[in-house]
Amino acid sequence: MEKLIIGSHVSFTKEKGLLGSTEEALSYGSTTFMFYTGAPQNTFRGKIDEELTKKAQDLMEKSNINIDDVIVHAPYIVNLANDKDEDKFNFAVNFLKQEVKRVKQLGVKKIVLHPGSHVGLGEEKGLENIIKGLNIVLDEKEGPIICLETMAGKGTELGYNFKQLKTIIDGVTNNHRLMVCMDTCHMNDAGYDITDFDKLLDEFDQIIGEEKIGCIHINDSKNEKGAHKDRHENIGLGTIGFENIINIIYNPRLKKVSKILETPYISTKDGDKDRSYPPYKFEIEMIKNKKYNKNFLNEIRNYYK
């Protein structure tokens, strides 16, 4: 039986680095994982600890996690679509270039990137800027692959349809280093019908090419199809539904693609304090069993007490 490549977002700390990320992923029963190499809301990045990285790589090998399935996510404040301020655009490009180098240093092969928001410049100009930035970032023929994420189309976001992603890919010289990260919540919110995923894959294949799917973010959505809002929900609690998500995860056309949960933490009161807990161990268990557990929220709260 072929291994299910399933995991979630995990932390990456200065103290434990990639080793801590790997240990956290294994505690959830994951066979892959995704992490930011620093805080997603800023561009501060510490030095990569080579000893911790080597220990992590050894642990992955021992635990049957293929590092080629592991994903890094670029910070979402990097915006290649906006060149209103040339210094900020150049900073974003240079930061992303350095982040790609960090990913390579960690031994990871793929980095997910939100394409960017045009902030009033218009879609055509925004796409031109993304292409310009990526041509600088991907100036070398070899290196980690950037996976452009499918977006919900909130505000002035770009990359909310396959044709825009195709435009970006076609405009980049070393586009063998570009793939796509599908996000189930984002595609639903952008207006795609993901209840018939084979049909959607056929459309993607015709426009971009199915071989360009680098990974998939698995999320339910708080919103109806086409809402353009981008609000993730825990699997089975949103408008997409558990069965549709299971059908996507187990689609035979995606068996070699990493599936990453980015579902919300579960909030609860602990005395007079508000606390939140990761749902991933329980969601991954449901996914592996292909059976929805109606009591999983309470089980999460009891588990972390």
Image (tube, grey):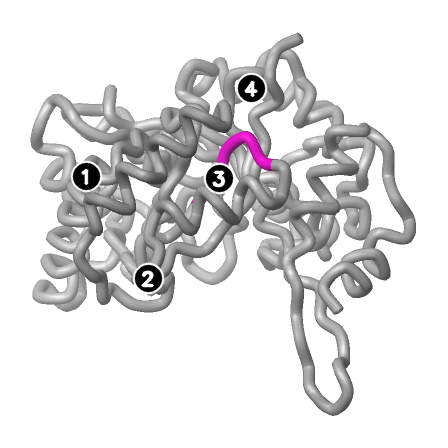
Percent x, y of residue 99: 21, 48
Q: Earlier in the sequence, mark 3 or mark 1?
A: 3
Q: Residue at x 13, y 61 (%)?
A: 91
Percent x, y of residue 97: 15, 46
What's under tag 1, amino acid-wise? Gln
For label 3, the residue is 33
What's under tag 3, amino acid-wise? Phe
Within-10-Å neighbours for mark 2: few <14, some 14–19, many 20+: few
- Residue 305 visible here: yes
For label 1, the residue is 105
> SS for tag 1?
helix
Percent x, y of residue 25: 53, 43
Q: Please identify, in this view, whether the residue under mark 3 or under mark 2 is nearer the observer.
A: 2
Residue 242 as seen in the image, left or right of residue 214? right
For the C terminus, the image quarter is bottom right
For the record, the magenta segment spans 30-34
> SS for tag 2?
loop
Who is closer to the viewer here, 191 or 277? 277
Marks 3 and 2, how far apart at CA: 19 Å
What's under tag 2, amino acid-wise? Glu
For label 2, the residue is 15
Q: Residue at x 75, y 37 (%)?
A: 285
Q: Please identify, in this view, whether the residue under mark 4 or under mark 2 is nearer the observer.
A: 2
Q: Which mark is residue 203?
A: 4
Marks 4 and 1, how far apart at CA: 36 Å
Residue 94 as seen in the image, left or right of residue 215? left
Q: Is residue 93 magenta?
A: no
* Corner quadrant of residue 3: top right
Tell me whether the residue at label 3 lies in contact with that at label 1, contact meaning CB atoms closer than 8 angstroms. Answer: no
